[in-house]
Image (spheres, rainbow, N blue to C red):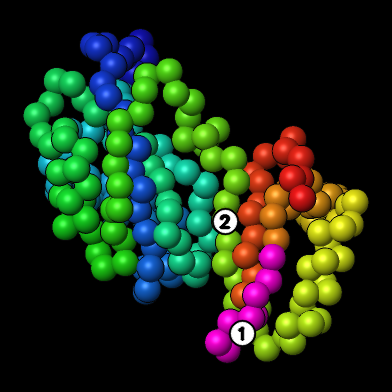
Amino acid sequence: MSGRQPEQGVPGRRIRVRYTVKGKVRFLSHRDVARVIERAIKRAGVPVAYSVGYSPRPKVQYGLALSTGYESDGEYIDIHLDPDREGITDTADMALALTACLPAGLDVTAACEIAAGEGSLQDSVESTSWVIHAGEIPLAELSARVDALVSAQSHEIEIIRKGKLVREDLRPLLMALSVTAGERYCVLCAELGTKPSQHPTL
């Protein structure tokens, strides 16, 4: 007989939460951030649903993993609520309670309910926005590089995937790219697609 039993009951609400990653917490790995958030959900009194079986886990879905060392104004998680448990269910109160239980740098900035038929969080993220300080590269030189990349039909790189060297064209994922002069460094602003099937809009 299997140790896992089928889930029963009426499916609960799904809450999408946006949070920041700033300061020292940017050096935590994606997995470490997930552990911190799951502990905060429990301490805040959010009635999260759990999987069934020998090792129940909170039903929390994460967006694209943020690379260690990078800050972010908008990371996302989906929290599935258990309709049979008591706790904070108002989204505004939930955002405040979660922030109070998170370390400095991890701040919940918004929370809203997601419709039952809405796709998964991973499927919902179609692009990511990046702001990059480009170091002490002269503006004219960097602008020329940006113009060359934007006007190129392709931009192939070699990467190791599953132990094999493959070539991949990154140009279709470049949706927007611009450069401006900052106070100390040039600043690159990029919009990068997350799905290989996307086509550039430039």
The answer to whether residue 116 is left or right of residue 10 is: right
Of the numbered discs 1 and 2, the one sitting upstream in the chain is 2
Number of dots carrying numbers: 2
Q: Quadrant of residue 93?
A: top left
Q: Quadrant of residue 137?
A: bottom right
Residue 41 in the image: state x and y as whole percent: 22, 45
Q: Secondary structure at mark 2?
A: strand
Please say whether residue 151 is visible from this viewpoint.
yes
User: Residue at 37% of width from left, 14% of height from top?
Assistant: 2
Residue most extreme to the left: 86
Q: Residues within 10 Å of mark 2 (few under 14, many from 20)?
A: some
Which quadrant, please, contains the N terminus? top left
Task: Report the amino acid beneath label 2.
Answer: Ser
User: Residue at 42% of width from left, 68% of height from top?
Assistant: 26
Please say whether residue 32 is visible from this viewpoint.
no
The answer to whether residue 92 is left or right of residue 161 is: left
Q: Residues within 10 Å of mark 1 (few under 14, many from 20)?
A: some
The answer to whether residue 91 is left or right of residue 130 is: left
What is the CA distance from the residue labelled 1 to the residue labelled 2? 19 Å
Task: Report the amino acid beneath label 1.
Answer: Tyr
Highlighted range, magenta: 178-186
Q: Which mark is residue 129?
A: 2
Residue 183 in the image: state x and y as whole percent: 55, 87
Residue 175 in the image: state x and y as whole percent: 70, 50
User: Residue at 9% of width from left, 29% of height from top?
Assistant: 86
Q: Secondary structure at mark 1?
A: loop
Q: Nearer the viewer, residue 149 or 51?
A: 149
Report which residue position mark 1 lands on.
185
